[in-house]
C-alpha cells in the first residue's frame, strides 16, 4: 500500500500545545508533525479543537504553552502575515466587488510585488484551478464550486508552504462536493504544498488524505493512513467515529497457541485471531465489525448468530440490512447487491444467520464500559 519512497521530512512540529478558553481546556498537551508535501486531515466531532489547531498554525491564536516550529525555526512568535501559511475559509471570504483576477491579485498587490510578476502568478494560479477563462467575473456570477476555487487560487498565489483549509467544502451540494474533493486532492499533488484540511466528515477525510489525525476532546486519538484508522483503529472512539461499526461485547476465555484466542461472544465460544495483541483470560473486550464485512445466510446454516431482519434499505450499490440478534442487539450489514445469490433473498421479519468474513473482526479492550 505504501510506496517505498523516503518518508517526508516534518515541516511543522507542534509540541505540548495547550489552550484554555475561560474554564474550558480546548487543547491538552497536543503533539503533531505535519510533513512536507502531504495532505493531512484533522477529523473529529464538533468542538474537539480542530479549528483551534489550524488557527494556531495560521497565527490567529496563541497557544498558552508549547511550541510550534517550521523546519526547526520558531513559528509561534511570528505574526500571522509573516508566516508561510495561508488559510482557505469555509465562507471563502472573497471580495464581492472585485472580479476573479483582482481577488487573486489582491494579496500580491498588498505586498507590492512587481506588476509583471503579479500578472504571471495570477494567471498561473487561475490556470491551476481552471478558472483563467472566468477572470473577469465577479464572485456573485460564479457557482459555489467556482468561488471555492477562486479562494484556493487566492491562497496558493502567495506560494505558502502550508495551506490550511477549514471545512472548505461543507457548503457545497453532494455532487459538487465529491468533485471538489477530487480536484483538491489533484491540486495538492500538483502543487506539492502541505495541505491541512479540517472536516468532521469521515468519508471526506478517508478519501482525500495521506494521513488522518483523529481528534477527541482536545487531544489526538490516532494518526494514520486512511486504511490504518479505518481497518486498525486503536480505540473504540476511532472505530466508532471513522465509519459505521457493529459492536459485540465479549470476553477473552484464554489465549491459544499460534496467535489465536478463545473468546466468548454472546452465547458462543469462538476461536479468533489475536491480531497480534496480548490478551489475558477474563479480559472484557469489544468485537467490532464493519457492516461491509458482515455475511448473512438463510437460517439452515449453522455458523453465525441467529437474527431477524428488521429493515432492508436498498442503496443502489449495496443492500443494507438491519438485523436484530436474539440478544436484542441491532447490527447493520451492507452487502453488494447480488440478485443471483439465493442467500440474498431474505425478507423483512425473516430469520437469518449472521457472521462475518473470517479475520476481519477488530478486537479492542472494552475501556469504555
Ligand atoms: P467545529 O467542527 O464545530 O468547528 P472544532 O473541532 O473545530 O469544532 P474548535 O472551533 O477548535 O472546535 O473549538 C473547540 C472549543 O473551543 C469549542 O468548545 C469552542 O466553543 C471553543 N472556542 C473556540 N474558540 C474560542 C474562543 N475564541 N473563545 C472561547 N471559546 C472558544
Image (cartoon, rainbow, N blue to C red):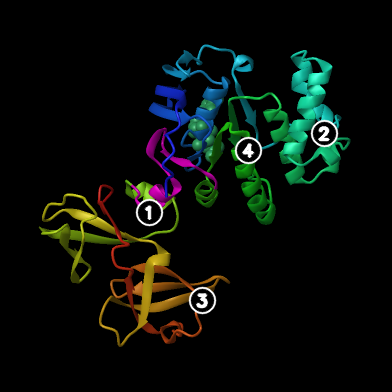
Residue identified by numbered label 3: 337
Question: What is the magenta range?
Answer: 208-233
| Callout 3 crowding tier (Cα within 10 Å): few <14, some 14–19, many ≥20 | some
Q: Is residue 32 visible?
A: yes
Callout 3 secondary element: loop
Q: Earlier in the sequence, mark 1 or mark 2?
A: 2
Callout 2 secondary element: helix
Vertical order, 51 against 173 (above or below) = above
Residue identified by numbered label 2: 100
Task: Please state which of residues 167 and 224 is positioned toward the viewer in this rendering.
Answer: 224
Residue drawn at the location 60% of the way across and 35% of the way down? 165
Residue 198 image point, x, y percent: 54, 38
Vertical order, 314 against 203 (above or below) = below
Residue drawn at the location 74% of the way across and 21% of the way down? 107
| Callout 2 crowding tier (Cα within 10 Å): few <14, some 14–19, many ≥20 | many
Residue identified by numbered label 4: 190
Q: Nearer the viewer, mark 3 or mark 4?
A: 4
Vertical order, 108 against 93 (above or below) = above
Task: Please state which of residues 220 and 292 is positioned toward the viewer in this rendering.
Answer: 292
| Callout 1 crowding tier (Cα within 10 Å): few <14, some 14–19, many ≥20 | some
Residue 249 image point, x, y percent: 26, 60
Q: Work out how far the residue at label 1 is from the one at label 2, CA to CA, in angstroms.
A: 43 Å
Q: Work out how far the residue at label 3 is from the one at label 1, CA to CA, in angstroms.
A: 23 Å
Residue 207 image point, x, y percent: 53, 50
Q: Earlier in the sequence, mark 1 or mark 4?
A: 4
Q: Nearer the viewer, mark 1 or mark 4?
A: 4
Relative horizontal placement of residue 151, taking residue 44 as reference (left or right): right
- Callout 4: CB less than 8 Å from ligand 1: no
Vertical order, 36 against 110 (above or below) = below
Residue most toward the right?
A: 136
Amino acid at each position: 500500500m505504501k510506496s517505498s519512497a523516503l518518508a517526508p521530512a516534518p515541516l511543522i512540529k507542534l509540541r505540548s500545545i495547550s489552550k484554555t478558553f475561560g474554564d474550558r481546556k480546548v487543547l491538552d498537551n497536543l503533539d503533531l508533525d505535519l510533513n512536507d508535501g502531504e495532505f493531512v486531515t484533522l477529523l473529529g466531532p464538533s468542538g474537539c479543537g480542530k479549528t483551534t489547531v489550524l488557527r494556531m498554525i495560521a497565527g490567529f491564536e496563541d497557544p498558552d504553552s508549547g511550541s510550534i516550529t517550521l523546519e526547526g525555526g520558531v513559528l509561534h512568535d511570528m505574526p500571522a502575515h509573516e508566516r508561510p501559511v495561508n488559510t482557505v475559509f469555509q465562507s471563502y471570504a472573497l471580495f464581492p466587488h472585485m472580479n476573479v483576477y483582482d481577488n487573486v491579485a489582491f494579496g500580491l498587490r498588498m505586498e507590492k510585488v512587481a506588476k509583471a510578476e503579479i500578472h504571471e502568478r495570477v494567471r498561473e494560479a487561475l490556470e491551476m484551478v481552471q478558472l483563467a477563462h472566468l477572470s473577469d467575473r465577479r464572485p456573485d456570477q460564479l457557482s459555489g464550486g467556482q468561488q471555492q476555487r477562486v479562494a484556493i487560487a487566492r491562497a496558493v498565489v502567495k506560494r505558502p508552504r502550508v495551506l490550511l483549509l477549514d471545512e472548505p467544502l461543507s457548503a457545497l451540494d453532494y455532487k459538487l462536493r465529491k468533485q471538489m474533493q477530487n480536484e483538491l486532492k489533484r491540486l495538492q499533488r500538483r502543487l506539492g504544498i502541505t495541505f491541512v484540511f479540517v472536516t468532521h466528515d469521515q468519508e471526506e477525510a478517508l478519501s482525500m488524505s495521506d494521513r488522518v489525525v483523529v481528534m477527541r476532546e482536545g487531544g489526538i486519538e490516532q494518526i494514520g493512513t486512511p486504511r490504518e484508522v479505518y481497518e486498525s483503529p486503536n480505540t473504540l472512539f476511532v472505530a466508532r467515529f471513522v465509519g459505521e461499526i457493529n459492536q459485540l461485547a465479549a470476553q477473552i476465555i484464554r489465549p491459544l497457541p499460534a496467535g489465536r484466542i478463545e473468546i466468548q461472544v454472546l452465547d458462543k465460544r469462538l476461536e479468533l485471531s489475536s491480531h497480534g495483541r496480548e490478551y489475558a483470560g477474563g479480559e472484557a473486550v469489544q468485537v467490532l465489525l464493519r457492516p461491509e464485512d458482515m455475511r448473512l445466510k438463510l437460517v439452515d446454516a449453522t455458523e453465525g448468530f441467529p437474527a431477524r431482519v428488521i429493515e432492508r434499505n436498498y442503496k443502489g450499490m449495496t443492500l443494507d440490512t438491519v438485523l436484530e440478534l436474539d440478544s436484542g442487539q441491532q447490527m447493520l450489514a451492507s452487502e453488494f447487491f447480488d440478485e443471483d445469490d439465493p442467500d440474498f433473498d431474505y425478507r423483512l421479519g425473516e430469520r437469518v444467520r449472521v457472521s462475518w468474513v473470517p479475520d476481519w473482526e477488530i478486537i479492542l479492550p472494552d475501556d469504555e464500559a
